[in-house]
Amino acid sequence: MATLVNPKHNRIGLEPADYKGGRTTLCAGCGHNAISERIIDACYESGIDPQRVIKLSGIGCSSKSPAYFLNRAFGFNAVHGRMPSIATGALAANAGMLGIGVSGDGDTVSIGIGQFIHSMRRNLPMVYIIEDNGVYGLTKGQFSATADLGSTLKTGVSNDLPPLDTCALAILAGATFVARSFSGDKRQLLAILKAALAHRGTAMLDVISPCVTFNDHEGSTKSYKYVKEHEEALQEVDFIPAAGDIQVEYEPGTAVEVTLHDGSRLLLRKLGHDFDPASKTAALDVLTRAHANGEVLTGVFYVDAAKPDFNSLLNLVDEPLATLPEDRVRPPQSVLAGIMQELS
Amino acid sequence: MEAVAPPVIGELVNDFSLQVASVNGSGSQSSNLVVLRTMFQMGIPVSGKNLFPSNIAGLPTWYTIRASRRHYIGRKQDADFLVALNPETAQEDVAGLIPGAAVVYDQPLQLEKQRTDLIFYPVPFDKLVTGIAADAKLRKLVRTMIYVGVLAHLLQMDIAEVETAVRRQFRRKPKAADLNWAAVRAGLDYARQNLVKRDRCRLERMHETAGQIIIDGNTAAALGCMFAGVTVAAWYPITPSSSLCESLIDLLRKHRIDPATGKATFAVIQAEDELAAVGMVLGAGWMGARAMTSTSGPGISLMAEFAGLGYYAEIPAVIFDIQRVGPSTGLPTRTAQGDIGCIAQLSHGDTRHLMLFPGSVAECYEHAIAAFDLAEQLQTPVFVLSDLDLGMNNWISPAFQYPARPLQRGKVLTADDLNRLGEFARYRDVDGDGIPWRTLPGTAHRNAAYFTRGSGHNDRAQYSERPHDYAGNMDRLRRKFETARALVPPAVRERAGAGRVGVIAFGSSHYPVLEALDQLQEEAGIAAGYLRLRAFPFGPEVAAFVGAHEVIFVVEQNRDGQMLDVLKTDLAPEMAPRLQPVRCYDGLPIAARAISREIEAHLALLAPGMLARNAAKQT
Ligand SMILES: Cc1ncc(C[n+]2csc(CCOP(=O)(O)OP(=O)(O)O)c2C)c(N)n1
Ligand code: SF4
Ligand SMILES: [Mg+2]
């Protein structure tokens, strides 16, 4: 039900064209392009005002993608691995904006792992997407830290270090919406993106996104073929928007429903696993098992819709700090006089 | 029976330096501050400098209090009076004194045996403290306060002012105030009955501190940030800069919570490192906030890549560098001016950064305010280079002035502007001053958005690798830097001089330089002109000053003459040979004597005739 047939206008009266980005310069068939398309669809279908969005990234092929969606949103292509700090400052300065961050597995899990972990720990209110291809695409295909043990490069070189699992890291660090999807799984990715956009707090999405140029060969565990063959969905994911009061039928015990910040709902229909997305230990358990079994497990692993996000901890005034007028940010002369008195 | 002071020849009235040697964490700081405040309340110009180890407790620390009727509030090279409270360093401390200096010390140390050319005042601290408190822990806390009473007698402090200073120091703990006051009394009574004044140091009431305050530079800078309307601050702790953000947090909590809602008009974020801190500042600045961070050398090194992004993508940011001794960890609790060369071009590629050099605590406050204005007017990171001496030590200053002009928010286009203009190109030089117009994220207009990137871009902020776009943009950034010359605080001609010899200095060297100039004038008849730099890029007044003098001494607290190098890159090549370095880089605040001695030696070597000519002019 979540896939709408695009009408001409969305909830806020905008057309699909209002969500377009620049023409992509990435390789044809690159997984990152499919993700950009899903971001456009999700924002359009959810009726998100592109002028209220900031799109941020680090450096990498993946980090170029913000230029390819939502032209009417402000973009910030930061330095390698440091998008989280830019996002933290920007969202504190104007807490009314919706942050969408796009990073790569190199950008996040190698050079940027410190800022990544700390932004998860802060539960920064933003959608954080890792376009995960197991290699550094932009520097021509070296292994990244998410490459699986034994996965090979085109040259035949085999990876002999274990991968870091971004979902497990994010859950341990404190992110409140953690999922994995696949750029080739249109339906699931779209539903997860919409739910992530409705979530208040860090929504961390690791999206397997094959690099057709450097990591799509036999022997790679991040190729289209490998992922299609080994993908195991934890649940069937549906997103039910807040508007419309839609009732969904399911047998008791066969699905979990999570109400998100804006009243929309995430519906997770069980597929084989009996899984509770409110439990961190359960999430870490399925992730560990999937690893051991050589499965590419996708789905929503963890959701906590109640934990306060970083900006609420900052106890900010309702208006954006960035544009508060002078009389609210410069205390009056009497305050300075009082301080001078104390120091004299 | 009260001991009566015999008359002393060559008295040092309100003109001496007192050093208190103690152990880190022993509570001596309260006693030192009471002495400082007493002098201040007696109307005497005074300064307090803490020389402390990189350690929390148990290592030696020295506090120097200087009284100067001539307003010399820089460091004096030699101490005239020592309070030796640390058995570990006492022998060495005494050995380093100039003949005729006085020593107050703990009797059992028997320092009087060490030298015959000093004046010794033994005090039985342990015996005196037993009468004050029964509890051993309390005794330990108030023990050093005894020296205050001893000094009150020996230096002829106004006792009422001492009591006022003690009660002020412990104003939130009346019991502690009573106890400490009792310790002062015990020292005072002991001294009156047992010590005969034989040294030359004495205090006398003046009227030079009316309307003045005592403050450290970091608190002053924090005040500046608050009155500049800072809204986002991100930081990572490091000595000697931490107290800037910590003071700022206190100030903002007190004065920037919306009374109606109880909510904050600011966000302070303790980042995971300096890289993240400056990233947060750039993110906030991009969004339109007035954002700052504060750090010291090691943090500056980490910020390099982001500093280049800030410069190239043109994002306002205010970065305080409270300089300490480097490279590497260096001497984390000692002072230097060693980051100038690094910051001027911080980042790879062609980069030029704005730097401000506050020369007093008042300027720490004023330059903080100016920095936020400049950062937004010029859309670039602005570095404020203070140092440990200025930042962490206590200075007297005229009370700070409320900012005279409103916040300067720079060239920002609103949705209405966009409607009126029809189009907008983020990096186009429409005004010819190199400063483009920007929009802020959240502006409700379909043409407001642009894409900020550190990669090559054209004037519409679109990705571009075209040679013409890249070079054109770099040229515009250079024009912008030229525009900055007229906007930054100009250099100040502090002394006119007699024309041949000039001195250029900046930052915490200022007061020592003033004193050194008096020494040169009075002792060698050299009337040097003095230009105090306050910012980089330099204004035309700097080249004019250099052009008007035959030899210019550039005084700075680093080994390599970093400011001299920056000056060379900015001045006409034929001017460069006129510049002579005067450097100090031992971690101690520069002292006037070191400056005047070096200048005299240089002149004797370079231009003996000039010395004579200057001397002749004098008479
Ligand atoms: C400080 C720094 N070091 C190295 C680089 C070179 N570099 C650019 S992108 C990249 C890796 C990108 O990998 P990933 O984030 O996985 O993105 P992908 O290209 O695979 O989408 C590297 C190492 C850089 N830009 N900056
Ligand atoms: S190199 Fe790989 S990651 Fe980069 S654009 Fe091409 S396919 Fe995508
Ligand atoms: Mg990658």
Image (spheres, coloured by chain):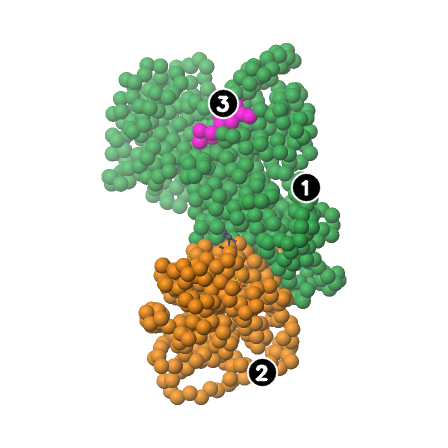
Chain colours: A orange, B green
Q: Name the residue tied to disc 1.
A: B482
Q: Answer with the quarter of the image where residue B460 lies.
A: bottom right
Q: What kind of element bears circle 2?
A: loop
Residue at (48, 23) in percent of width and height? B15
Location of the N terminus of chain B by quadrant is top left
Residue shown at 58% from the left, 44% from the top: B349
Would residue B177 be seen by someone viewing this image from the given angle?
yes
Labels 3 and 1 share a subunit: yes
A20 sits to left or right of A189: right
Residue B424: percent from left, percent from top: 71, 59
Question: Between marks 1 and 2, how big is the CA–CA gap?
Answer: 56 Å
Q: Are marks 1 and 2 on the same chain?
A: no
Which kind of residue does numbered mark 1 sit on? Answer: Glu
Kindly identify which chain the residue marked by label 1 belongs to. B
Q: Specify few, some or many for label 2: CA neighbours under 10 Å numbering under 14, 14-19, or 20 or more.
A: few
First to last magenta residue range: B581-596
Residue B173 percent across, percent down from the top left: 37, 45
Residue B480 place in picture, x, y as percent: 67, 45
Residue at image point 59% right, 68% down: A69
Which of the numbered marks, if any, corresponds to residue A5? 2
